[in-house]
Amino acid sequence: MSCYRTVGTAWRQFAAEHGEAWETAVARWLEDYGVHQLPDRYRWLVTEVILRLPEGWSSHCSCTIRMAGEGEVVREHYAEARLSSDADETCWRQAWEVVLNAAALNELTDAAIRGCIAHELAHVGSALLPTPEKYNLHENRADNIAKWWGFEEDLKVLGVVW
């Protein structure tokens, strides 16, 4: 599968250390994120992004990725990372969801969509709860985390500048 070419050794090593075949581990991780229910193009792009993320990037939370429903408002136009309404307040782990807006994303190149997905997952990885008064801080932090994860070129295609 071509999307696995960019995977670093950390994910493979993690699977081996936990006694899982690589393919089994990948399938489980992707199912945990809800990737199986995405349309084909987005399933591949999300998979490419997730498999490039560093080990432990989401150890503090759970995260699902889904397409926006008809008429659903996506605050950031292309995509939005938000705390899930399914969050269990008694649990120490945050529950996030990343909502992709196909109507807006369909106009972008694959590289720009990868940059957008990496940016939204960086919000999740930062563990910073979104607040309107710290909007710019959160956006800059997400851009820099995604850049650190190796998505600088994808972010440039999306139009992010430093």
Image (cartoon, rainbow, N blue to C red):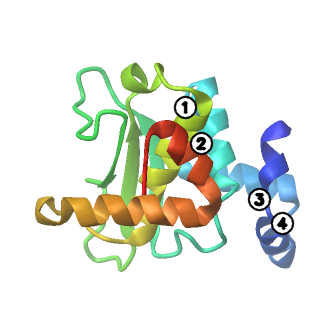
Residue where numbered disc 4 is placed: 12
Marks 1/3 in contact by CB < 8 Å: the verdict is no
Cα distance in 3D space between marks 3 and 2 = 16 Å
Residue occupying the point 58% across, 53% down:
152
Residue where numbered disc 1 is placed: 38
Crowding at dot 4, Cα within 10 Å, few <14 / some 14-19 / many 20+, comes out as some
Q: Amino acid at mark 2?
A: Val
Above or below for 59 versus 41: below
Q: Amino acid at mark 4?
A: Arg
**Sooner in the amino-acid sequence: mark 3 or mark 2:** 3
**Which of pointers 3 and 4 indicates the residue nearer the eye?**
4
Residue where numbered disc 3 is placed: 25
Tell me the quarter of the picture where residue 55 sits: bottom right
Marks 3/2 in contact by CB < 8 Å: the verdict is no
Give SS at disc 2: helix
Cα distance in 3D space between marks 4 and 2 = 18 Å
User: Which residue extends farthest left?
Assistant: 133
